[in-house]
Amino acid sequence: MKPTPLHAANPGPYTGDGNWTYLIPGERPVLIDAGVGNAAHLDAIGAAAPAGPADVIVTHAHSDHASGAPAIRGRWPAAGLTKMPWPERDGDVPWQSLADGDTVMTDSGSLEVLHTPGHSPDHIALWHAESRTVFVGDLLQLGTTVFIPASSGGSLSEYLASLERLRHLSPVRAWPAHGPVIEDPMALIHYYLDHRRQREEQVLAALADGLATVEAITDRIYTNLAQALLPMAHESVLAHLVKLEGESKARGAEALWVLRR
């Protein structure tokens, strides 16, 4: 599997240097993720596949991955647009539906659809068994951890289960939507799992000391954090609290959280 990386030309505070999309070449080119519709991205797609992609497979509905689909369809009307459904976010794009275990055919071999929720409820990865490589969307990213938006469809419990599912496959390379190619995904997965366990211990310790709000727990854990990043830190703490509540280790009422004894 040798995809062509195509940058979506969308740097920003939440996308970093911007998104990577991946074109799998052949007589029926397949594009993984749609970007945001920037002309530079569309031109890069056209340079790599002049007739356009036969299919566009979107890893999840967040705008930096999915909002470029109408622009791609506008330039190449025959392009198929496919993703796992998230009705609240899918809008009026004529998506074809994907499900866990489906097969996406490419000229470089078949890809298995893996439902990997957590970052979003519709998130998928695409597994190429022959090479043990995987397109991971926002499941993994070098140099940082993955944001879990607990108040808008994210679930830390589901995210950790998705990491475990990928770990059991033992991938040797991963192509992420952000950052460089991951040449040792197993090491990163183990780091992520350890990091989340450590963060959970910090949240539990804060609750044990009587800190009862997301804001207070965030201030304890995330010291010297830039003001602009506080909303994401709040969401991260909330994701841990919701996980703990699901495990009957904490409970929340009217934005106040306590340990369950």
Image: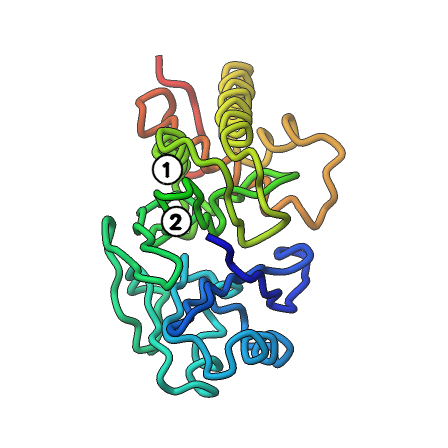
Tell me the crowding category of disc 2: few under 14, some 14 to 19, or many 20 or more residues within 10 angstroms, Cα based.
many
Picture quadrant of residue 37: bottom right
- At 34% from the left and 34% from the top, the residue drawn is 165
Label 2, secondary structure: give it: strand
Tell me the crowding category of disc 1: few under 14, some 14 to 19, or many 20 or more residues within 10 angstroms, Cα based.
many
The relative height of residue 166 versus residue 5 in the rendered view (above or below) is above
- The reply to whether dot 1 and dot 2 touch (C-beta < 8 Å) is yes
- Numbered tag placed on residue 162 in the rendering: 1
Front position in the image: 211 or 96:
96
Amino acid carrying label 1: it is: Ser
Q: Which residue is mark 2?
A: 125
- At 49% from the left and 74% from the top, the residue drawn is 68
Amino acid carrying label 2: it is: Ala
Tell which residue pokes out farthest to the top in this image. Answer: 261
> Could you tell me how far apart the alpha carbons at marks 1 and 2 are, in whole angstroms?
10 Å
Q: Position of residue 137 (x, y in %)?
A: 47, 52
